């Protein structure tokens, strides 16, 4: 006489009848549940987590939770929608917990211990002043047709279309002028730096 597999037994007996809240879940039934639905639960968890490892951890935790709450499932509910709800709620809880932990760790951080890098050091301020001086010098040495658009761009902070209007030129012509002006300026600055070394 052939014996029934645990999966066949699960189809014959409703979960509520198979699982008594006072009794632990039968290991064969639980291992069959795991084998039959793990990929499905993992797919749900992957929707919540970017990292595959996080999704796998969450899926394993869902089955640990199922081991404890399987007896609470209503007999009339189909298993897949119920396990979807359990897995989704578990993933949301896990994400909320992670967010709380991150925000509490940020609150615990002493802001006075973090060095303030927004204020440049005196050496970097001096180097920056020297670079600005070199830039201004090379800018004044450019021909007037290249100098004017760069001054409007860098010092007046105008857009290309505004500069084209001020200089009474078309936008494509201005773009070509800017490209050439920046090229001349770059070459002159590199030549000056090479001459200093």
Image: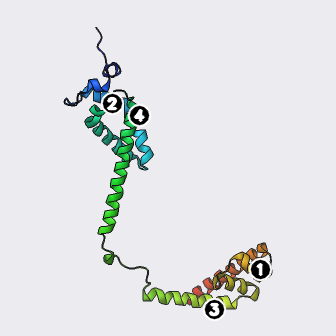
At 36% from the left edge and 57% from the top edge, which residue is drawn? Answer: 99
Between the C-alphas of marks 3 and 1, the distance is: 26 Å
The percent coordinates of residue 117 (x first, y second) are: 41, 79
Residue at numbered disc 3: 137
Sequence-wise first label, 4 or 3 = 4
Residue at numbered disc 1: 165
Sequence-wise first label, 4 or 2 = 2
At 31% from the left edge and 26% from the top edge, which residue is drawn? Answer: 15
Is 96 or 42 nearer to us in this picture? 96
Is 70 or 123 nearer to us in this picture? 70
For marks 1 and 2, give the one nearer the viewer.
2
Secondary element under disc 4, as helix, strand or loop, is helix
Secondary element under disc 3, as helix, strand or loop, is helix
On the rendered image, what quadrant is the N terminus found in?
A: top left
- Residue 39 visible? The answer is no
The tag on residue 156 is none
Say above or below: 93 vs 153: above
Between the C-alphas of marks 4 and 1, the distance is: 64 Å
At 38% from the left edge and 79% from the top edge, which residue is drawn? Answer: 116
Between the C-alphas of marks 1 and 2, the distance is: 74 Å
């Amino acid at each position: 006489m052939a014996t029934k597999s645990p999966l066949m037994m699960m189809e014959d007996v409703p979960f509520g009848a198979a699982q008594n809240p006072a009794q632990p879940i039968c290991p064969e039934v639980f291992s069959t549940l795991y084998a039959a639905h793990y990929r499905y639960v993992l797919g749900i968890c992957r929707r919540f987590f970017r990292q595959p490892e996080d999704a796998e951890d969450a899926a394993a935790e869902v089955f640990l939770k199922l081991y404890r709450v399987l007896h609470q499932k209503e007999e009339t509910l189909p298993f897949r929608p119920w396990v979807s709800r359990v897995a989704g709620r578990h993933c949301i809880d896990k994400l909320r917990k992670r967010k709380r932990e991150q925000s509490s760790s940020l609150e615990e951080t002493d802001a006075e211990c973090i060095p303030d890098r927004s204020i440049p050091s005196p050496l970097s301020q001096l180097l920056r002043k020297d670079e600005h001086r070199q830039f201004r010098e090379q800018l004044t040495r450019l021909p007037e047709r290249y100098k004017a658009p760069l001054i409007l761009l860098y010092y007046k902070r105008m857009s290309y279309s505004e500069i084209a209007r001020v200089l009474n030129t078309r936008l494509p012509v201005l773009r070509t002028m800017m490209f050439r002006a920046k090229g001349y300026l770059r070459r002159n600055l590199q030549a000056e730096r090479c001459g200093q070394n």
